[in-house]
């Protein structure tokens, strides 16, 4: 257990004085006996780790079947066996961790991943509200992410990898990929930066590898993300994450249109995961003092996380990820509005600020989608109405859609809910125009405002 080299390479070497290489006396026999005892001890520990993995593999497989809503409930005898294997696996894992005297082996790390992620399905009954991204099924996120996450077990796994010198010291390719994916999924669900760096970075952008893009893809690539240009609050790291999401969107659109010269999901999956990793790495510790740029950056970050959750790294609705993200985005938007309402005067003259209303409209659209069927839905629709009433793009859905396409927007998923929200925002805007009062402003008194958190 305390050996972290691949088990197939494990061996013991008898060390002795070269001058005694021809002598086979008591010392040599004692050395051989010690070597044999060590080998037996290692094999027993390895069998214990493997036994734990076997138990979790059985229970995990059953949990994956349970997580798929299309499958019927397990028969009682199978359910009893599943619970037995799960309990035995946990007992073996706890015993192994308590008796651990050195770095955790690959087998033990694998047991921790299974114990932390292949558990009971989430009891949440939140339905899927939107068309699914092909990337959900490409790596079975629609099933794996329906299982309950056990943060304490995942933290132990991360600490164990750290004691081995980090993920870069995990030399088995398959194990590295498993740890990378487990860390990425857990970070996406909790909303924290990943613990591991990206091990296999792509040196070139996805779209630059495909020289024969069709006209639709070329036009899409020329427009997507241009709305973010020249905005000072977007730093280099965030810009790279946004650019990556744009590239993945163009590739997904080409795949979905089934172009013969387009992409395959194999081409897209790894880049999509790396893009999600880049975006999660931009999450910063909240600043004690809010500024316009900090709030705008956070608004962009929250909105991009919602977009990725719908397109790039799509988690099932049962995770509750979208409501969490929409709540965070609302907090950032409220902070930005409060700061914007405070006019800064110098020598009696009001200082003009850059107009970010188009960018805010994009963020509001994504926030409204993520907030669907939650207490924040009305707030987002009212805010959409307020900003639409001042936008030159408000007159037709076609004009408004063209604006959205300059940010992050995939029509295949977002057009249908986007058009519905545009109509709802128009109705809210007309109601505002007829009364001259934004009734939703009075909600501020009943909601504590957390600045950029």
Image (cartoon, helix red, strand yellow):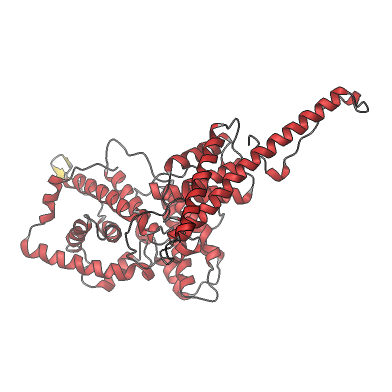
Quarter holding residue 162: top right
Q: Where is 252 relative to 230, above or below?
A: below
Residue found 31% across the figure and 44% down from its top: 294
Residue 360 location (% of width, % of height): 26, 56
**Relative to 211, is 13 on the left or the right?**
right
* Residue pictured at 54% horizontal, 35% vertical: 95
Q: Nearer the viewer, residue 417 or 318?
A: 318
Q: Name the quarter where the C terminus is drawn.
A: top left
Q: Residue furthest front?
A: 77
Q: Is residue 197 visible?
A: no
Q: Is residue 7 above or below residue 379?
A: above
Image coordinates of residue 145 in percent, x first then y, are 43, 55
Identify the image quadrant of residue 170.
Answer: top right
Pick the residue in front: 403 or 109.
109
In the picture, residue 130 is in which quadrant? Answer: bottom left
- With respect to residue 337, does 252 lie above or below? below
Describe residue 261's horizontal placement relative to residue 136 as left or right: right
Q: Is residue 299 visible?
A: yes
Which is more toward the observer, 400 or 103? Answer: 103
> As rendered, which of 196 and 36 lies closer to the eye?
36
| Residue at point 25%, 41% (across, down) | 451
User: Which percent across, then down, holds residue 425?
Assistant: 19, 65
């Amino acid at each position: 257990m305390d050996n972290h080299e691949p088990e197939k390479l494990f061996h013991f070497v008898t060390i002795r004085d070269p001058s005694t290489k021809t002598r086979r006396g008591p010392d040599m026999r004692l050395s051989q006996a010690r070597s044999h005892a060590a080998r037996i001890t290692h094999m027993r520990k390895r069998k214990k780790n493997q036994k734990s993995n076997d138990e979790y593999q059985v229970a995990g497989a059953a949990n994956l079947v349970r997580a798929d809503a299309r499958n019927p409930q397990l028969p009682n005898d199978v359910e009893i066996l599943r619970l037995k294997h799960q309990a035995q696996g946990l007992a073996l894992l706890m015993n192994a961790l308590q008796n651990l005297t050195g770095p955790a082996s690959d087998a033990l790390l694998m047991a921790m991943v299974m114990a932390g992620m292949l558990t009971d399905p989430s009891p949440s009954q939140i339905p899927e509200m939107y068309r699914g991204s092909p990337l959900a099924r490409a790596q079975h996120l629609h099933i794996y992410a329906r299982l309950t996450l056990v943060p304490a077990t995942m933290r132990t796994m991360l600490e164990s990898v750290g004691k081995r010198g980090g993920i870069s010291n995990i030399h088995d390719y398959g194990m590295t990929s498993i740890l990378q994916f487990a860390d990425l999924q857990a970070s996406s669900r909790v909303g924290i930066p990943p613990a591991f760096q990206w091990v296999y970075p792509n040196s070139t952008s996805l779209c630059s590898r495909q020289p024969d893009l069709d006209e639709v893809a070329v036009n899409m690539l020329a427009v997507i993300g241009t709305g973010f240009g020249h905005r000072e609050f977007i730093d280099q790291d965030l810009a790279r994450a946004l650019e990556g999401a744009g590239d993945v969107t163009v590739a997904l659109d080409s795949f979905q249109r089934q172009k013969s010269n387009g992409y395959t999901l194999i081409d897209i999956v790894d880049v999509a995961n790396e893009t999600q990793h880049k975006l999660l790495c931009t999450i910063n510790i909240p600043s004690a003092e809010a500024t316009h740029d900090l709030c705008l950056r956070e608004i962009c970050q929250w909105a991009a996380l919602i977009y990725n959750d719908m397109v790039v790294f799509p988690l099932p609705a049962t995770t509750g990820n979208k409501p969490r993200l929409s709540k965070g985005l609302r907090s950032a938007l409220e902070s930005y509005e409060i700061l914007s309402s405070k006019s800064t005067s110098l020598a009696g003259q009001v200082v003009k600020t850059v107009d970010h209303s188009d960018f805010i409209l994009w963020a509001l659209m994504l926030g409204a989608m993520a907030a669907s069927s939650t207490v924040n839905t009305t707030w987002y629709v009212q805010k959409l109405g307020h900003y639409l009433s001042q936008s030159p793009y408000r007159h037709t859905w076609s004009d408004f859609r063209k604006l959205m396409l300059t940010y992050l927007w995939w029509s295949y998923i977002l057009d249908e809910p986007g058009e519905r929200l545009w109509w709802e925002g128009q109705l809210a805007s007309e109601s505002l125009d007829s009364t001259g009062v934004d009734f939703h402003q009075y909600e501020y008194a009943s909601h504590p405002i957390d600045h950029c958190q």
